[in-house]
Image (cartoon, rainbow, N blue to C red):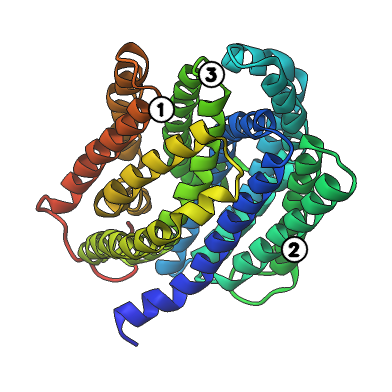
Amino acid sequence: MSDFKRVMKLFWPVFAEQVMGVAVGVLSTAMVSGVSSEAVAGVGIVSSLNFVVINLFIAVATGTTVVAAQLMGAGDVKAAREASRRSLALVAYIGAAVAALLLIFEKPIVNLLFGGAEAAVLDAARTYLRFSSVSMPLLAVSSAAGGIMRAVGQMRLPMLGGLASNTVNLGVTSFAVYTLNAGVAGAGWGLLASRAAPAAMLLVFLQLGHGPLSRLKLTPKVGFKAIKPVLAIAVPAGVDSLIFNGCKLLVQMFMANMGTDTLAANAVLGNVSAFVTLPGAAVAVLAVSMSGRAYGEGDHAAARKVALRLALLGSALNLLSAAVVFAALNPIIQLFTPTAAEYKLIRDCMVMFICVCPPIWGFAFILPNSLRAMDKAPYTMAVSAASMVALRMFCAWLFGVHMGHGLYGIWVAMFLDWAGRGVFFMLPLLRKGWKKETPNSPP
């Protein structure tokens, strides 16, 4: 089987999972938009806060995927299994701790970060945050379980978990919002149910499924020795994500004083723009396991080639999806029943996004996944931190607040951040010194 055919065989299940997630996210937001613009804005600002937390779980899942893929590449199945089951215990404890903190400090967190928003927006945000907080341990477990499966190329099982999640989300949210008239709380019930379904399914798959990392014996003990290699990837990746999403959250604070139209438009933009990056996001998931497997086999030159080819593939696929979204842009926006002011903001920013995203997004977000799989997580963390502070945050303040361009200035700052990080993620892959080692040599 050719390399391209092999990649596409792995790509389609992951892509289908991404499509389902984005599509249901769009429909859920569209349902909430029928309640009020304040409800959309409230859900949107909590989603920004959630991204900060969720990426801590994703960092552990990424570390698990990288370590398991490297160990499988080196032929050490026993160590891969041990690291996987200990990771499940670790991420469950992290999820429980995060849930407790968010529930205890719910009101001061929302008021501190978004106190400039209208009272109705803050009430909606606090309601949605309660449901999101309770569901955090479930999300943590499903993230780690999916990472374990992807490490050995089992892409279909996480896809089935995603299918269950999205079906449940859509069903519960529509019933709660339209039949029970539960408003934002209805979206919260849908979110909670959608995180419980895949957690249960994926744990069952790990217990009953087939393959080298299936039939795992769950344990309440973390075990530092087994988890140390995972943490070596997860900690820098977690800090990377914390800085990245923390800075995005601070930028969201700039918008809190720009009015409900801006907050609602930005929430809608988060959903619509995700359609453009769907194929690239799927390739980014593959990059972790594919680059990690090649690196674990000792073929560092092949791992570098995999990284570069996947970034180019993601860019090409994003170009196709951008063309499709542009053709259907008006009806997509109308799903959210925007006001005239919101419509203009959404359309203008999406046109910019469609033009800028395809050539640079893949290098900014696919390459770092490959680099983490090649033991360069500290480097990706440093680049991400510098780019977020110097380009995303400062330029968002400069263009959006100081110069008065509002949401337009904030999105231009985002594009500058992408370009900056893409350049620096390319540098270690272009330099000389990558060598081909004997298979199964230590990475």
Horizontal placement of 261 versus 95: left or right?
left
Q: Amino acid at mark 1?
A: Leu
Is residue 103 among what the camera can see?
A: yes
Q: Earlier in the sequence, mark 3 or mark 1?
A: 3
Residue at horizontal 23%, vertical 36%? 420
- Outermost residue toward the bottom in this view: 1
Dots 1, 2 in contact, CB < 8 A: no
- Rendered location of residue 49, percent (x, y): 59, 29
Secondary structure of the residue carrying numbered label 3: helix
Q: Nearer the viewer, residue 418 or 300?
A: 418
Q: Amino acid at mark 3?
A: Ala
> Is 315 drawn above or below residue 368 in the view shown?
below
Q: Nearer the viewer, residue 288 or 89?
A: 288
Is residue 64 among what the camera can see?
A: no
Residue at horizontal 54%, vertical 70%? 155
Q: Nearer the viewer, residue 307 or 26?
A: 26
Q: Earlier in the sequence, mark 1 or mark 2?
A: 2
Q: Give the residue at mark 2.
A: 201
Q: CA distance from mark 1 to mark 2?
A: 40 Å
Q: Give the residue at mark 3.
A: 256
> Is 273 drawn above or below residue 381 in the view shown?
below
Q: Nearer the viewer, residue 390 or 297?
A: 390
Q: Amino acid at mark 2?
A: Met
Q: CA distance from mark 2 to mark 3?
A: 38 Å
Q: CA distance from mark 3 to mark 1?
A: 11 Å
- Outermost residue toward the left in this view: 432
Horizontal placement of 288 versus 118: left or right?
left
- In the rendered image, which quarter is residue 180 located in? top right
Q: Give the residue at mark 1.
A: 407
